[in-house]
């Protein structure tokens, strides 16, 4: 698959077929994903593939109460989302069928392999993720190349102590994301909805657009 096509069609899949994903597909994808950029080549990411039905159900049982609270906020108008109504409906379906996905990949990262430079700024620290999430996206693209769909969720990270105990994750590792993996129930999207380049790219200063915002004649 051509790279830009993969990038434009690797959306969040919330409905999967029951077909299992073979080990060789996973191995090929992990082999590519590990080349994602990371600070100092410290390679902090470790992957944990969960296929066991009981473990998937246990993860789903942790996930659903948090989703229910979030979903109640959406429907009650206290949580603002930019998603379309169908997307929210699909996300609700996803939450209620999480245990049925073929596999859940738990993204773990060694804390001593991260180097956050923003933790003293008095706001949310995010820089440590720069050594994690490019590799996560590599995995999603590598699976897409093989016709396998994914969804990245971070909601379960709130339940890290319970997840760590359940999956015997060492204390020196954090959970950075969970990725559902499987063949899509329907086709991959042909076009994802994103903001136009003209609205998201600035030149020199934040308020100065780099590209012309006026419509083409």
Image: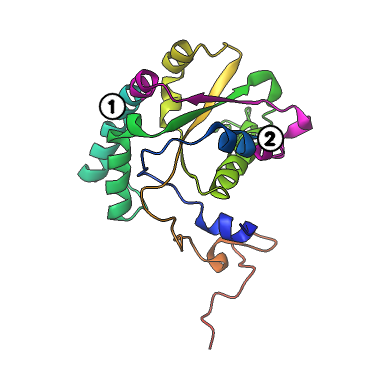
The x, y position of residue 161, in whole percent, is 45, 14
The quarter of the displayed image where residue 100 is located: top left
Q: Are marks 1 and 2 in contact (CB under 8 Å)?
A: no
Q: What element carries label 2?
A: loop
Q: Is mark 1 on a helix, strand or loop?
A: helix
For image coordinates 67% across by 64% down, the residue present is 203
* Foreground residue among 190 and 215: 190
The x, y position of residue 213, in whole percent, is 54, 74
For image coordinates 67% across by 29% down, the residue present is 116
Q: Seen in the image, is 17 located left or right of residue 111?
A: left
The region drawn magenta spans 31-59
Q: Seen in the image, is 158 located left or right of residue 214?
A: left
Q: Name the residue under label 2.
A: 34
The x, y position of residue 34, in whole percent, is 68, 35
Disc 1 to disc 2, C-alpha distance: 33 Å
Sort mark 2 into few (<14), some (14-19) or many (20+) by Cα contacts within 10 Å. Answer: some
In the drawing, what numbered circle is on residue 65? 1
Q: Is residue 85 above or below residue 58?
A: below
Q: Which of the marked residues, 1 or 2, is nearer the chain's N terminus?
A: 2
The x, y position of residue 132, in whole percent, is 62, 33
The quarter of the displayed image where residue 127 is located: top right
* Foreground residue among 91 and 204: 91
């Amino acid at each position: 698959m051509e790279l830009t096509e993969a990038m434009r069609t690797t959306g969040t899949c919330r409905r999967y077929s029951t077909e299992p994903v073979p080990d060789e597909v996973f191995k090929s994808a992990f082999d590519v994903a590990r080349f994602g950029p990371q600070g100092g080549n410290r390679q902090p990411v470790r992957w944990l593939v969960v296929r066991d039905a009981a473990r998937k159900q246990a993860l789903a049982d942790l996930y659903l109460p948090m989703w229910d609270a979030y979903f109640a906020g959406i429907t009650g108008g206290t949580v603002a989302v930019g998603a379309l109504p169908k997307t929210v409906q699909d996300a609700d379906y996803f939450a209620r069928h999480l245990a049925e996905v073929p596999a859940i990949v738990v993204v773990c990262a060694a804390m001593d392999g991260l180097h956050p430079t923003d933790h003293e700024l008095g706001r949310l620290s995010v820089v440590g993720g720069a050594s994690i999430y490019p590799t996560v996206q590599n995995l999603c693209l590598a699976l897409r190349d093989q016709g396998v769909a994914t969804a990245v969720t971070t909601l379960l990270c709130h339940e890290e102590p319970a997840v760590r105990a359940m999956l015997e994750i060492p204390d020196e590792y954090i959970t950075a994301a969970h990725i559902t993996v499987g063949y899509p129930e329907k086709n991959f999207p042909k076009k994802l909805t994103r903001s136009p380049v003209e609205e998201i790219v600035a030149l020199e200063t934040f308020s100065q657009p780099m590209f012309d915002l006026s419509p083409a004649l």
